[in-house]
Image (tube, rainbow, N blue to C red):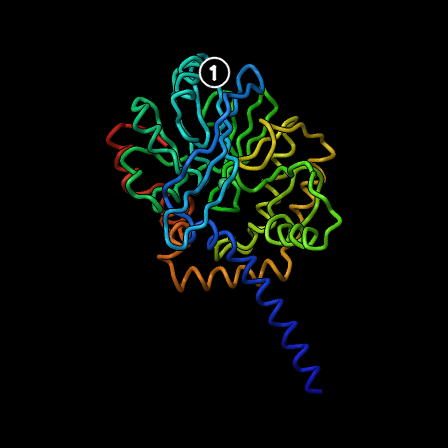
Amino acid sequence: MFEAIIIITSIVAIIAVAVIVRAMWDPFYCCFMTTSDIGVLSSSSLIKISPSVYISEHFINSGNSGKWARSITKFSRMLIVVHDGELCLYNPCPLTEELKKELAELGRIQRVVVTNCFHYAFLTQYIDAYPEATFLVPQGMMWKRPELQQHCIAIPAATEGSLFAGTHYFRLPDFYQEHVIFVEEAGLLYCSDTLYIREPEKRPHGRFNIRLMQKFIRLISFSQPCGVIHYFDYVRQFRYPGSDDLHKKNVECWSRIFALPITRITTGHGVFCGCVSVTKAELKNLLSCIERKDGWMDRAGRLVFRICMRKSPDRYRDWTCLYDDEAQFDHHHHHHPSIERRKQARGMGE
Ligand SMILES: [Fe+2]
């Protein structure tokens, strides 16, 4: 009897730890333990995808100057769309001298867009270098980094539309106002953080500890194997409060996106070059992964995440912007008050 109690208690404790680690991995690992001294380990020259689309790829290091800092390295991608000698850049990457030259050869930078509330680390480099350009960020960014209000305007409140000729955006109801970008001429879909392209499997499978590690990574990131491209299932844990129909809305949004003539996909991160080809069957498979209802682990993770956010909003400052009404597009007012004033001053319409 006593042994049974110990075994049951241990199992419950292990499950609880797994839920907590899964829910807090990203906010803790990516925010609390990293510092602002981001470094560029390497940057390749522009990758041409089609006559109007280029990708800039960088290998980035988060820096490790703080006491608790952990340095994270990851690939980061910027999408560049060209139209009539004008450029639109999505998710600014480090502006190196070489990149500046390459961009100048392609045309004049008209717009710079940040597609979710996380990919803004290099935005100020562009604000300084291209004062003539327009800078667009999600509404939540205006609340998260108020200092950006004087340089940027919010992406329109409409959940889909176009921010640049030949491109279309969809704002996902999920994950920190993530905007998915479709470029018609290239049949290319750019999704920063909610889709993930799996790196080719090169590591040995045999060893138990490696298999365990791979299982763990899948648990905290993409739980359903669905071909080369994955949906980052763990974002379900960050769904904001008061949005019970969010899953339904999310599925509807992705159904609309996957109905587009998509032949290529690129993502903000992941180990691959430029973009990958995708078939209709793969997109259908991906949609069925997105359609999966939230599991008990997602719901338990959401509970843990919300408790941590409420308990220490300062520590997780980067993750709290969806917990404030002002950061939302469809609550009370459509734009941040200061943006509204600027627009009126300039005589701009909706
Ligand atoms: Fe990201």
Of 45 and 188, the residue lying toward us: 45
Percent position (x, y) of residue 82?
A: 48, 17
- Residue under numbered circle 1: 83
Percent position (x, y) of residue 105?
A: 43, 12
- Please give the name of the residue rendered at 69% of the width and 38% of the height, measured from the top-left corner: 202
- Ligand 1 within 8 angstroms of badge 1 C-beta: no
Percent position (x, y) of residue 128?
A: 30, 28
Instruction: Tell me the quadrant of the picture where the N terminus can be found.
Output: bottom right
User: For mark 1, does the 10 Å Cα neighbourhood hold few (<14), some (14 to 19), or many (20 or more) residues?
Assistant: some
Image label count: 1
Q: Is residue 153 placed above or below 17 in the rendered structure?
A: above
Q: Is residue 322 visible?
A: no
Percent position (x, y) of residue 242?
A: 48, 57
Quadrant in the picture for residue 204:
top right
**Amino acid tagged 1:** His
Q: Is residue 49 placed above or below 228 in the rendered structure?
A: above
Q: Is residue 337 placed above or below 345 in the rendered structure?
A: below
Instruction: Tell me the quadrant of the picture where the C terminus can be found.
Output: top left
Furthest-bottom residue in this view: 1
Q: Is residue 247 left or right of residue 153?
A: right
Of 89 and 184, the residue lying toward us: 89
- Disc 1, SS: strand
Q: Is residue 232 placed above or below 294 in the rendered structure?
A: above
Of 343 and 64, the residue lying toward us: 64
Of 326 and 315, the residue lying toward us: 315
- Please give the name of the residue rendered at 68% of the width and 55% of the height, measured from the top-left corner: 209
Q: Is residue 225 visible?
A: yes
